Amino acid sequence: MNFIVYNHQMNFKNYFSLGLITLYNFLFAYKYIAEQTSLGLVFTIVYILLFLGAFYITNRINFRWFNSKVFYYSLLLTCSLMFLLLFRYVKVESLHVDRWSVINVFWEHVFAGKYPYSAQSNMGNYPGPLPVYFLLALPFYFIGEIGIFSITGFLLLALFMRRNLTPHKSAVCLILIILSVPILWEIAVRSTIVVNAVLFILYTSWLLDLDMNKKKNFFLSAIIGGLVLSTRSILVLIFVVYGMYMLRTRLFTFQQLLLWAGMVMFVLVCTILPFMIIYPHAFLKMNPLFVQTEHLLPLWFSFIFIVFAIIAGWYCKNKHNLYFAVGVVYAFFFACYAGFNCFEYGFKQAYFGNVIDLSYGLFGFVFLLFAAFKQSSVIAVNVK
């Protein structure tokens, strides 16, 4: 039987990205396994060994069918059907996650003529995402299953990898996505962070492929950028990295960067303006910008993240480096967020007591996953 032995020449960035992905899987798996058994650490180590073993085996040796479109899309379809089946038996009300509920109560308040950002989820939380996020979720609210929104994020991520990586690399990447506990958990609990993270990397990829010398692309990218930013404000870190990269490579002048950034912020304000006009007093008391800043970290942390993003962007010599830089920036954000809460509440309470929302690590996860494969070279040997 014929098969191919692959020798992937991985560099430091590939290994570092894979290391952070593995660490994130460990943190996610250990938390939920340890809640069920006293042997949580043992089972988590076994899981990590299986995860790395799957990467090693599929990354080096595979049969020809492994690279085929039939295998890739069949696996994707099978997983999607299994997720839909899971929704049938796992009731969302029984889960200790409320992002699905936040979407529901937001639109219930809108259609009742009430200020939507004063709504509270089934767990007492206020809506944090910005308006376009809820607009994207509206079709799934009407369908009655927010989980399909989560599956959409999974499918878009898989399609993005297939389009931008070699057939073999994309197949290995899909295996790792399926074996990643954070992705599986996100879908099972109908969370939507993975959709937001995928939206960010899709926009970043599209942005890097544009010829900014064309006025149409310049203005269109800023308009769409403002709309994407109007999902979660944390996207601003990507803009900082991108802006520094464009200056570093002299694709933007400083004046062009200011104009582009100003247009992005103008579009963002336009999406928020209706709530400020219709509900001025309620908006001052509770709004998404307040929830996404003060409820995560003190405001002064934002300056640290922006400085870190500026440095990361300045060291990007080409567009492929930018994915790695963004992944590291978001990993740094997550480390600061987790570390601050551990300091404030103690490790046990912060980690096991749900003070730290581990799902925020997914913003860096998707970029690091892509960076782990994008820049490695491949030497293939046919073996009979």
Image: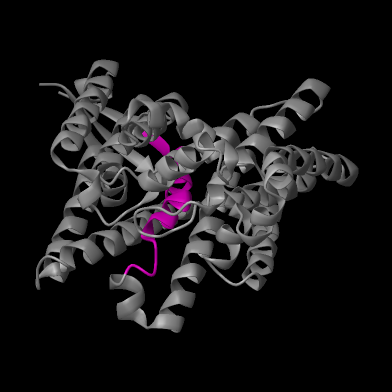
Q: Give the position of the C terminus as an image quadrant.
A: top left
Q: In the rendered view, tell whether residue 356 sits above or below residue 263.
A: below
Does 180 lie within the magenta span? no
Q: Is the magenta stretch mostly helix, strand or loop?
A: helix
Does 361 lie within the magenta span? yes
**In the displayed structure, does residue 270 sit left or right of residue 196?**
right
The magenta segment is 354-379
Q: In which quarter of the image is residue 64?
A: top left
| Relative depth, front residue between 235 and 89 | 89
| Relative depth, front residue between 236 and 52 | 236
Q: Position of residue 134 (x, y in %)?
A: 51, 38
Q: In the rendered view, tell whether residue 178 sits above or below residue 156.
A: below
Q: In which quarter of the image is residue 26?
A: bottom left
Going by the picture, which residue comes out furthest to the top? 70
In the image, what residue occupies the spot 49% across and 68% down? 337
In the image, what residue occupies the spot 36% across and 29% down? 155
Q: Position of residue 368 (x, y in %)?
A: 45, 49
| Relative depth, front residue between 275 and 370 | 275
Q: In which quarter of the image is residue 289?
A: bottom right
**In the displayed structure, does residue 3 sit left or right of residue 336?**
left
In the image, what residue occupies the spot 44% across and 24% down? 163
Q: Position of residue 33 (x, y in %)?
A: 17, 63
Q: In the rendered view, tell whether residue 42 sits above or below residue 237.
A: below
In the image, what residue occupies the spot 73% across and 34% down? 222
Q: Where is residue 357 in the image (x, y as percent from the top left)?
A: 39, 62
For residue 214, say whether it is visible.
no
**In the displayed structure, does residue 159 sit left or right of residue 45?**
right
For residue 184, say whether it is visible.
yes
